Amino acid sequence: MTTTMMAAVYYGPGELRLEERPLPIPRSDEVLLRVTRSGMCGTDASEWKSGPLIFPVKKAHPTSGHFGPMVMGHEFIGEVVGVGSAVDVILVGDRVASGAGISCGKCARCLEGRTNLCKQYVTLGLNRDGGMAEYVAVPATTLKKIPEDLSDDEAGLAQPLAVGIHAARRARAQNGDTIVIIGAGAIGTFVLAGLNYLAEVSSIVVDFDGPRLDRARRLGATHVVPVAENTEDELRNFVGENGADIVIEASGAPGQMQRALSWVRRGGTLLQVGLPTTPPELDVHHAVMSEITIETTLAHVCGEDLEPALEILATTSLGQELLEGVFALDNLESQLNELASGNIQGKVLFDPSR
C-alpha cells in the first residue's frame, strides 16, 4: 500500500490546498478507510469563506489537540483497508459510512444516550483531520455498514441525513401531528425524510416557489406553500387558525424564527434547526403566554441515527433527488464558493480517487 495520499487541507479563509500527506496510522480502536465519497456542508463553506471560526487552525482544539492546517471533510464513506488491534466488528473490505462524531461513552451526557453532547466530543473534519482525502483513520464506533444494494453516491449522504433524523426526533412528532417546515434546502429535506420515517404526520413545507418545493412534494410533503404575499393565508388553510402542533425552522434566514413562533399552536413546539447569521429578535411574551416549547438540535447520535439514514437511502429516492454531482477533489474550492453563494440546492460529493 502507498505511504502517502492526496488531501484537501484548510489553511485559512479562501486558502485551501491539495497536497500530499503521509498515510494516517489508525489507533488500536480505529480503522483505515479508503475514502470513496466525501461531502461538504454549510459549516465547511462558512469556514472557507470567513473562518476559522471552529476549525483549530489558529488555536489548538481542547480535546483533539489538533492545531494548524487541517484536512476537511466530516461527511464521508469508504472501504476498510486496515483495522486496529482492538477492532473486531469491522472487517477489511467492508463498505462503511462514518458518523464522524467521536464521544467518550463515559460522561453524564453519553450515559444519557446524548453522545452528540459529550464533554469530550470531537468531529473528524471539524476538530481533527477528516475525510476530504484519499484515506482517513476513523474510530470503529462511528461506523455503520452500508447495505450491499446502496450505491456509493447515495450512501455518501448518510451523515447529513442522520443529522436530519436527529432533528426530527428532537421535534417529538406523534402520529397525526400537523408540522410546518420552513426551508426546503438540504437540511429541511433531510428533516422531512426523518419525520416521514418516524411518524405519520401532515407536513407543510414553506419556501420560495421553484425546484426545492417541487422536490419536497415528490419526497412526501403533504402540502407545499410558496413564499408570497398570501403565504400566511394559504398556510392557515392547512394548519387552521389555532396553528401547527410543531413548526421546524430549517432556513436560518432573518426573521424566520419569529415567524415560526407565530405559527405554533398554544402548547405546541418550535424546533430551531437553522443557524441565523445575526441574533434573532423573539417575542418571548407570546411564547410564555402560549406555553410554547422551544427546542434545538445539534448534529446526531451515531448509534441511533446513522443506520436509519442508510435504510432510508436504500429504500427511497432521497439520494437521487438531492445529489447534484460527484467531483474530483480539485473542484472543492469552486464548489465551496458555489455553496457559500447559495447556488447549490441539494448536495454535492467528492471522489478522492479521481
Image: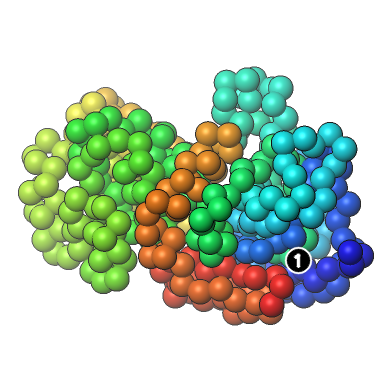
Q: In this view, does 133 lie above or below 254?
A: below
- Residue 206 visible at all: no
Q: Where is residue 206 in the image (x, y as percent from the top left)?
A: 25, 56
Q: Position of residue 161 (x, y in %)?
A: 48, 50
Residue at coordinates 19% horizontally, 29% vertically from top-left? 266
Residue 338 falls left or right of residue 236 = right
Residue at coordinates 17% horizontally, 65% vertically from top-left? 228
- In the image, 197 versus 299, the foreground residue is 197
Residue at coordinates 37% horizontally, 59% vertically from top-left? 317
- Tally the marks: 1
Q: Mark 1 points at which residue?
A: 134
Tell me which corner region of the image, top left, top right, bottom left or bottom right, holds residue 86.
top right
Question: Which image quarter holds the C terminus?
Answer: bottom right
- Residue 270 visible at all: yes
Kindly state the secondary structure of the residue where label 1 is placed.
Answer: loop
Residue at coordinates 82% horizontally, 51% vertically from top-left? 82
Residue 79 falls left or right of residue 206 = right
Residue 246 falls left or right of residue 53 = left
Q: Position of residue 279 (x, y in %)?
A: 45, 49
Q: How crowded is mark 1: few (under 14 residues within 10 Å), some or many (20 or more)?
A: many
Q: Is residue 110 above or below residue 203?
A: above
- In the image, 62 versus 290, the foreground residue is 62
Specify the amino acid type for callout 1: Glu
Tell me which corner region of the image, top left, top right, bottom left or bottom right, holds residue 342.
bottom left
Question: Which image quarter holds the N terminus?
Answer: bottom right
The way the protein has been coloured in the rendering is rainbow
Tell me which corner region of the image, top left, top right, bottom left or bottom right, holds residue 21.
bottom right
Residue 134 falls left or right of residue 240 = right
Q: Where is residue 50 in the image (x, y as percent from the top left)?
A: 62, 66
- In the image, 296 versus 352, the foreground residue is 352
